Image (cartoon, rainbow, N blue to C red):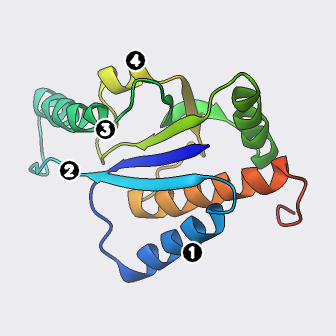
Amino acid sequence: MKITILTVGKLKEKYWKQAIAEYEKRLGAYSKIEVIEVPDEKAPENMSDKEVEQVKEKEGQRLLAKVKPQSTVITLEIKGNMLTSEGLAKEIEGRMTRGQSDFTFIIGGSNGLHKDVLNRSDYALSFSKMTFPHQMMRVILIEQIYRAFKIMRGEAYHK
């Protein structure tokens, strides 16, 4: 089993890095885990729609260059499917049962994901209709992946 979290932008704050490191350590008992950061595209505050699309396209190309052909891609999208923790565990477990063992979760940049990334997605996942800072979303995502493994194994933690 291999989990990759692919994200736009660099994690700078020590406390977010510490939280990610803790969950990477915990997940090690269940899966190989890798967090890959691709550079975000520098962009001015007030961009035109065309400029936003160009930024998303450049970031999207960087993301897609890191996705392995055999990987099951799960994109984080506001318009994605909202699941409970148990629902996420069931989704991952069902895919594992069907022989999928390489998962890539993608978190886009501040402007979202380019259509090419969305088209490569095997499953669109949403944690909320709200918008969260990307750094926080990384921590939430990795914690929920860890929780999903605990649920799948019937181990205490998820309540």
Q: Nearer the viewer, residue 78 or 89?
A: 89
Circle 1/circle 2 CB separation < 8 Å: no
N-terminal-most mark, 1 or 4: 1
Q: Position of residue 153 (x, y in %)?
A: 85, 52
Q: Residues within 10 Å of mark 3 (few under 14, many from 20)?
A: some
Asked whether, in this view, residue 60 is left or right of residue 149, the answer is left
Q: CA distance from mark 3 to mark 4?
A: 15 Å
Q: CA distance from mark 1 to mark 3?
A: 24 Å
Q: Residue at x 48, y 36 (%)?
A: 77
Circle 2 residue: 40
N-terminal-most mark, 1 or 2: 1
N-terminal-most mark, 3 or 4: 3
Circle 4 residue: 119
Task: Tell me if residue 104 comes above or below residue 81 in the rendering.
Answer: below
Q: CA distance from mark 1 to mark 4?
A: 32 Å
Q: Quadrant of the C terminus?
A: bottom right
Q: Residues within 10 Å of mark 1 (few under 14, many from 20)?
A: some
| Amino acid type for the residue under numbered disc 1 | Glu
Circle 1 residue: 22
Circle 3 residue: 66
Q: CA distance from mark 2 to mark 3?
A: 14 Å
Q: What kind of element bears circle 2?
A: loop
Circle 1/circle 3 CB separation < 8 Å: no
Q: Nearer the viewer, residue 46 or 65?
A: 65
N-terminal-most mark, 2 or 3: 2
| Amino acid type for the residue under numbered disc 3 | Lys
Task: Tell me if residue 69 comes above or below residue 1 in the rendering.
Answer: above
Q: Position of residue 2 (x, y in %)?
A: 55, 44
Q: Position of residue 43 (x, y in %)?
A: 11, 48
Q: Residue at x 12, y 40 (%)?
A: 47
